[in-house]
Amino acid sequence: MAEALTLVGLAGNIVQFLDAAGKIVSFAQELYKGGSLNVNDEIEKTTRALQESLTLIDFDKVHKDARLQALISACMVLTDDMTELLEGLKVTKKRNQLMEVTSKSFKMIRERGKMKDLERRLGNLRDGICSYLTVILKYGDAVFVSNKD
């Protein structure tokens, strides 16, 4: 019975290894052809658009609110982190392109969890900022003046 469980565990490990190897080869092909992954390009465009829209908010003219400023500042930090991470996953097409592609493919596998976490956190902050601005636009400063700390 123990041998059967060992064989099932070994088979599961082999399948997991083959899955990871397939992803690395797929990433490597896409990186070799384009220099970056399409998914990463989409995330980068969205992140940069969010960053640009946040820089348009003029705190002096629009609203002097420490909570809103804190949300925007935290979001800007995360957009910088995401942009830096994505830049580190691009291939620069130097002489040893194949080595760099292989290295970046492994790095992509390692950094996927961090990317997903940053995406989730950015989405939460973006939603928080949008909700906050919606309340300000709908109810004006009266809501926040009565609830000041």
Image (spheres, rainbow, N blue to C red):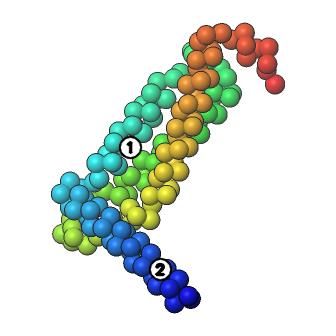
Q: Position of residue 18 (x, y in %)?
A: 34, 73
- Can residue 123 be seen here? yes
- Tag shown at residue 8: 2
Residue 112, picture quadrant: bottom left
Rendered view: 96 above or below 148: below
> Cα distance, mark 1 to mark 2?
38 Å
Mark 2 crowdedness (10 Å alpha carbons): few <14, some 14-19, many ≥20: few
Residue that badge 1 annotates:
43
Mark nearest the camera among 1 and 2 is 2
Of residues 69 and 17, the one drawn nearer to the viewer in this rendering: 17
Residue drawn at (51%, 48%) of the image: 118
Secondary element at image label 2: helix
- Can residue 76 be seen here? no
Of residues 47 and 25, the one drawn nearer to the viewer in this rendering: 25
Q: Position of residue 97 (x, y in %)?
A: 21, 67
Rendered view: 95 above or below 66: below
- Left or right placement of residue 113 versus residue 36 in this view: right
Mark 1 crowdedness (10 Å alpha carbons): few <14, some 14-19, many ≥20: some
Classify the position of the N terminus by image quarter.
Answer: bottom right
- Tag shown at residue 67: none
Identity of the residue furthest to the bottom in this view = 3
Q: Earlier in the sequence, mark 1 or mark 2?
A: 2
Residue drawn at (35%, 58%) of the image: 89
Of residues 136 and 6, the one drawn nearer to the viewer in this rendering: 6
Residue drawn at (25%, 59%) of the image: 31
Type of residue at label 1? Ile
Type of residue at label 2? Val
Q: Position of residue 66 (x, y in %)?
A: 68, 27
Secondary element at image label 1: helix
Q: Position of residue 7 (x, y in %)?
A: 46, 84
Residue drawn at (49%, 58%) of the image: 113
Residue 27, picture quadrant: bottom left
